[in-house]
């Protein structure tokens, strides 16, 4: 069964049989239960021990053969098992013995080295073990002595590659000139000895894992050598091995460019151009495709970082904060990583990794209500915010005269009521606290106070900005004025000549306004709850940091959703790669680069060339800091960070004009901060065309092609913040010449729009039926008012019973837009408000069942000034709920105060919901709070059996899943995260005991389920969501049954399609990886289908590396050899060849572990 001899080796038995037939396995006798070879530890150990002690060549060879056979079949587990049994050490010891012997015998050394490479490849500690065994330098010397024997050299190189997994081993080799020895083995393009060449490059790359070796390689000038080699191999080698060699050279380049000096050298040696040009070739040749990605990444890595062309990283908008010295604008603070991501988005990144870590497992924190953050005495002031309780409804007695204007004025006057809260005086006294820096209209004389506080510099600066001063006349943008003037000139030709240009500016202005009035009359669309003139008058009172005096046309004129749905944009294949390459080309070929600043928020005198686009953003919600014309039809756009801040960019809204129709313009927003975006998954920005509006289509529409989002090479202007910036690029082809257009991240919804909308709503309700009261919750830091709206049904009469019912109605509190960029939240809120005021019977029932308290915009200042995340205090207001500061976060402080008050009078809200927008997920969904689910999900050991929890928090999401097409129940979760402990949802749940406390997240993009699947959401769908949310509240009314049975259920359109939809798993709803997402790691992406083992195996099987082989033969064999990693066991044929002229015919039916059959050779 088992025997070995000089010309006769075979073994076709099993290890089990082997035990009995060879003295070495005697110890195994008496353990007949062993079935599989590797389940026998001692069998293996005996083999390994024999290997180290075997004296003669034949027994060593045989042991190596058996080991190789065993390891070749089955999975890696066998190798790991062998490693655990000291396999690496045994092989290393055998190697030492053989190298140190009087004359190294390559008959043994070659198979030994091969086996060592295969095993060591899987052994993470092989480098250290090799050092301990003293093998590292021995192997290097062996290589030195055998550089002319390619097969031997290759074997040494693989082992060196494997040893280099240890930094100290790699350094040891480097110190002993290993890099030079190996580098000399890499020739220009050839067809000879390809495996040895590849082994040399791989070993070289492996040695470059250490800083010292990289430095050495850079200083020895190997980068230019590697570039030359790459160019040569790339241009000539299209066979698989040659491509693998090119790829390995790229890997070396990747490694040496991990150092700054390496990158600089690569750039100075013309590496970028070389890579760019070779990539162009690779893109045309399918066989070279695997080289594109590593080349593109290498270029991205090496193209030097370009600071954003800004004088400061600080926002262009600064505002003096109360009770704190005004921060000097240019003091750049490190971004606080923990607060950088939003509540709605952070979870995505962390869901896999530390989701569980973040869950609250402290039962006390989950169950017990903390003490209030303020004394009880401060609560009564909020009674004023419950006018429905104190109101006497005298007007009901006059209901025979519903048109009575006094009723309307009674409620409308409340808009302007300036109730001063005890703890927080809204106006004058607060101003003194705020360093007196803000020179508001009514207190221009209060500057002396500031000097005493020592902030003179800030004051001077702010005076220069004419802070808070409002031009009494709001105007339209210059571009729009030009357009109107043209229109008027055209009109005046047809009509009378009485509207000719006047010299006087006033007259010009009044003419302009007359003209706009006429345009409105002629072209203005009927937009429900929107009146341009009302908007105009409201906007004049809005206070912005820069003192906006110009209205954006869309906000003024109004928006109607376009007819039909807007599908998500298809993504062009390879679009990202194309854009990245175009950016690299910008670095290389500067002839067509214009690099002309055409817009600067801080320099209004700036004029672009006559044929460049014109930009403008100094209006409410506007955000564009700078525009730079890069090429004829390409512009870089830089967004303004949040006011007072040097970070948070995402929201944009700007005007663009002076365009030529039908020309694709490329826009690059180059200072985005989030690492990924729905712009990679079908989302488009929105565009509003003035010409289209004047032609009766006042629509924000989704637009743009070639959209993608990727990391770029910009860094912060001052280079202090370690920020990575991302580019959002899109291409717009305008429809009209000389149009005035607006582009935005999402459908804008300004603070003034909210105020105008509330006024219009107020005017629209029937005061005999609907109790609608708008009040000021509080003033903001910039002295805008934060509106609070109360909506409920008027009692049927002033009788005791009706009044009692009214005063005992439970409350629903809805808030929104705490994050300024989440304008979708405002559109959802608009839907909610309009529905609650409507004559819809469901709305009527809801009003009769509940008192609604709505705070539609928790962050007016952030919204007005075009911020993305924060308020003027540069805080994320949705992280302030635990202990909000009355001065710095007034809207949160007083919203919480109102909730405390409601709690204190036994009217804790039945439902609380904070409306948000989500930039990285699709659909609309809710986050709620559940103690039990949190404990379960966290894997907590707390026994939840005895814990009681009302499951009612699921009712609304379940109902919404049936009612709202955009809603995805499976995206909802009810986990209480530690990182969200200061958010509205968690605080209202924990501190106010509100069971149904939610965050509602609406996508900026669209849906991937339900009837809206594949469509982007528009304002129609967002408003619908607001309606559906209200309808879902029926599910929590006390008299739910009656409501459903009587008349209401039929009003809810339970679309069968909607009922059908089953959404996907909530924990998988992160975006699938983008098909061609650029890997941002600095490492070279691996070449598929190649690894060390297949190289070794291929080398051995192809039997072509004998020193003087015939070339023609070899090439053919290479081609078949590479990639055939299925041939695992290769030592045998090799050994046989060493000993006999016969070749091994059959070695294919290698068994999978138990039987190993071989051919008997004789
Ligand atoms: Zn949000």
Image (spheres, grey):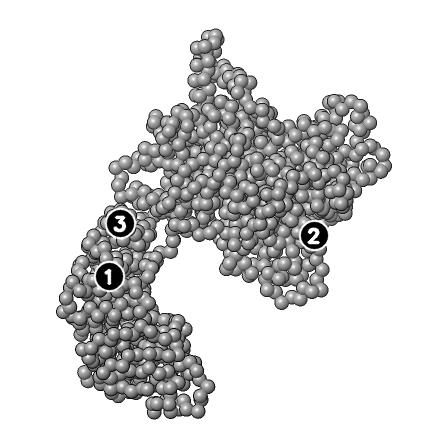
The percent coordinates of residue 890 (x first, y second) are: 62, 42
Please give left or right for residue 574 compared with residue 759 in the image.
Answer: left
**Is 784 in front, or is 349?**
349
| Residue 261 position by quadrant | bottom left
- The label shown at residue 285 is 3
Q: Nearer the viewer, mark 2 or mark 1?
A: 1
Instruction: Report which residue position mark 2 lands on.
Output: 952
Q: What element does badge 2 sit on?
A: helix
Q: Quadrant of the N terminus?
A: bottom left
Label 2–label 1 contact, CB within 8 A: no
N-terminal-most mark, 3 or 2: 3
Mark in front: 3 vs 2: 3
Q: In this picture, is 319 found above or below 375?
A: above
Which residue is pictured at 58% across the width and 31% down the height? 753
Label 1 sits on residue: 1119
* Residue 613 spot, x, y in % from top left: 38, 30
């Amino acid at each position: 069964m088992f025997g070995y001899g000089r010309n006769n080796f075979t073994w076709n038995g099993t290890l089990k049989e082997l035990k009995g037939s060879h003295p070495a396995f005697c110890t195994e006798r008496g353990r007949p239960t062993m079935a599989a070879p590797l389940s026998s530890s001692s069998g293996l150990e005996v083999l390994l021990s024999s290997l180290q002690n075997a004296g003669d060549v034949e027994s060593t060879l045989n042991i190596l053969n058996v080991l190789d056979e065993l390891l070749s079949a089955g999975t890696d587990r066998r190798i790991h098992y062998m490693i655990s049994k000291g396999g690496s050490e045994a092989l290393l010891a055998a190697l030492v013995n053989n190298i140190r012997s009087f004359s190294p015998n390559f008959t043994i050394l070659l198979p030994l080295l091969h086996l060592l490479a295969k095993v060591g490849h899987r052994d993470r500690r092989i480098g250290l073990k090799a050092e301990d065994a003293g093998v590292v330098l021995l192997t290097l010397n062996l290589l030195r002595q055998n550089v002319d024997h390619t097969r031997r050299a290759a074997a040494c190189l693989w082992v060196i590659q494997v040893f280099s997994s240890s930094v100290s081993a790699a350094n040891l080799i480097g110190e002993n000139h290993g890099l030079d020895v190996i580098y000399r083995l890499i020739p220009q393009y050839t067809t000879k000895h390809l495996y040895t060449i590849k082994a040399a490059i791989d070993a070289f790359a492996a040695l470059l894992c250490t800083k010292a070796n990289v430095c050495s390689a850079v200083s020895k000038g190997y980068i230019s050598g590697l570039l030359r080699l790459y160019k040569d191999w790339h241009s000539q080698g299209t066979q698989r091995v040659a491509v693998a060699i090119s790829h390995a050279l790229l890997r070396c380049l990747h490694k040496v460019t991990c150092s700054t000096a390496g990158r600089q050298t690569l750039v100075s040696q013309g590496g970028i151009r070389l890579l760019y040009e070779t990539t162009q070739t690779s893109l045309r040749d399918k066989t070279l495709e695997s080289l594109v990605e590593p080349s593109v990444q290498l270029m991205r890595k090496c193209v030097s970082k370009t600071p954003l062309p800004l004088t400061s990283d600080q926002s262009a908008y600064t505002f003096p904060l109360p009770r704190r010295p005004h921060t000097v604008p240019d003091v750049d603070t490190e971004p606080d990583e923990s607060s950088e991501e939003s509540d709605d988005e952070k979870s995505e990144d962390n869901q896999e990794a530390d989701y569980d870590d973040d869950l609250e497992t402290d039962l006390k924190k989950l169950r017990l209500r903390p003490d209030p953050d303020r004394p009880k005495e401060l609560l009564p002031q909020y009674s004023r915010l419950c006018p429905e309780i104190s109101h006497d409804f005298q007007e009901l007695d006059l209901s025979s005269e519903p048109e009575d204007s006094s009723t309307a004025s009674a409620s409308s006057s409340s808009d302007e009521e300036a109730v001063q809260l005890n703890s927080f005086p809204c106006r004058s006294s607060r101003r003194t606290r705020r360093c007196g820096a803000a020179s508001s209209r009514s207190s221009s004389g209060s500057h002396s106070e500031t000097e005493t506080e020592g902030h003179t510099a800030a004051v001077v600066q702010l005076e220069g900005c004419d802070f808070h001063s409002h031009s009494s006349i709001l105007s339209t943008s210059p571009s729009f004025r030009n357009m109107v003037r043209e229109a008027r000139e055209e009109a005046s030709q047809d009509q009378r000549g009485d509207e000719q240009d006047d010299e006087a500016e006033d007259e010009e202005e009044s003419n302009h306004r007359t003209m706009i009035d006429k345009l409105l009359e002629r072209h203005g669309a009927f937009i429900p709850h929107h009146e341009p003139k009302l908007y105009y008058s409201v906007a004049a009172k809005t206070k912005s940091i820069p003192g906006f005096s110009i209205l954006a046309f869309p906000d003024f004129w109004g928006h109607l959703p376009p007819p039909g749905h807007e599908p998500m944009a298809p993504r062009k294949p390879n679009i990202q790669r194309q854009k990245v390459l175009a950016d690299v080309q910008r670095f290389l070929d500067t002839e067509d680069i214009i690099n002309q600043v055409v817009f600067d928020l801080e320099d209004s005198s700036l004029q672009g060339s006559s044929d460049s686009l014109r930009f403008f953003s100094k209006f409410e919600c506007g955000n564009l800091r700078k525009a730079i014309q890069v090429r004829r039809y390409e512009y870089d756009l830089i967004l303004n960070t949040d006011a007072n801040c040097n970070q948070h960019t995402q929201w944009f809204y700007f005007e663009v004009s002076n365009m030529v129709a039908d020309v694709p313009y490329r826009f690059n927003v180059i200072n985005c901060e989030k690492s990924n975006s729905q712009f990679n998954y079908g989302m488009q920005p929105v565009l509003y065309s003035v010409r289209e509006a004047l032609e009766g289509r006042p629509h924000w529409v989704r637009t743009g092609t070639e959209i993608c989002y990727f990391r770029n090479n910009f860094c912060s202007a001052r280079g202090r913040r370690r920020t990575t910036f991302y580019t959002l690029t899109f291409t717009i082809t305008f429809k009209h010449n000389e149009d005035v257009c607006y582009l935005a991240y999402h459908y804008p919804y300004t603070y003034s729009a909210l105020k105008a909308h509330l006024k219009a709503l107020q005017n629209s309700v029937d005061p005999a039926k609907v109790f609608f009261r708008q009040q000021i919750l509080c003033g903001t830091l910039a002295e805008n008012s934060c509106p609070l709206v109360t909506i409920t049904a008027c009692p049927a009469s002033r009788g005791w019973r009706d009044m009692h019912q009214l005063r005992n109605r439970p409350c629903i509190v809805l808030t929104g837009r705490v994050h300024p960029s989440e304008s979708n939240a405002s559109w959802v809120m608009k839907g909610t408000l309009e529905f609650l005021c409507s004559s819809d019977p469901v709305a009527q029932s809801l009003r009769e069942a509940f008192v609604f308290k709505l705070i539609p915009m928790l962050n007016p200042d952030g919204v007005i000034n075009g911020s993305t995340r924060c308020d003027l205090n540069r805080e994320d207001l949705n992280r302030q709920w635990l202990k909000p500061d009355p001065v710095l976060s007034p809207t949160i402080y007083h919203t919480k105060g109102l909730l405390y008050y409601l709690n204190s009078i036994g009217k804790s809200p039945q439902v609380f919901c904070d409306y948000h927008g989500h930039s990285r997920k699709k659909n609309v969904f809710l986050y709620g709070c559940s103690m039990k689910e949190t404990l379960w999900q966290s894997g907590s050991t707390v026994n939840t059996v005895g814990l009681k929890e009302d499951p009612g928090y699921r009712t609304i999401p379940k109902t919404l899943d049936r009612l709202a097409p955009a809603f995805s129940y499976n995206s909802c979760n009810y986990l209480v995260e530690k990182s969200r402990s200061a958010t509205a949802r968690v605080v209202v749940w924990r501190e106010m005991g509100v069971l149904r406390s939610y965050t509602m997240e609406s996508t900026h993009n669209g849906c991937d389920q339900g009837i809206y699947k594949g469509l982007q959401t528009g304002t129609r769908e967002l408003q619908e969501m607001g309606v559906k949310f209200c309808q879902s509240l029926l599910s929590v009314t006390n008299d739910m049954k009656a409501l459903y049975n009587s008349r209401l259920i039929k009003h809810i359109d339970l679309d069968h399609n909607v009922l059908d939809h089953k959404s996907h798993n909530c924990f998988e709803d992160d975006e699938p990886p983008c098909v061609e997402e650029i890997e941002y790691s600095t490492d070279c992406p691996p070449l598929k289908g190649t690894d060390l083992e297949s190289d070794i195996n291929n080398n051995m099987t192809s039997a072509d590396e004998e020193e003087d082989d015939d070339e023609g033969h070899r090439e053919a064999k290479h081609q078949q050899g590479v990639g055939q990693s299925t041939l695992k066991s290769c030592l045998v044929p090799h050994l046989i060849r060493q000993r006999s002229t016969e070749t091994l015919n059959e070695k294919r039916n290698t068994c999978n572990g138990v039987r190993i059959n071989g051919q008997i050779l004789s």
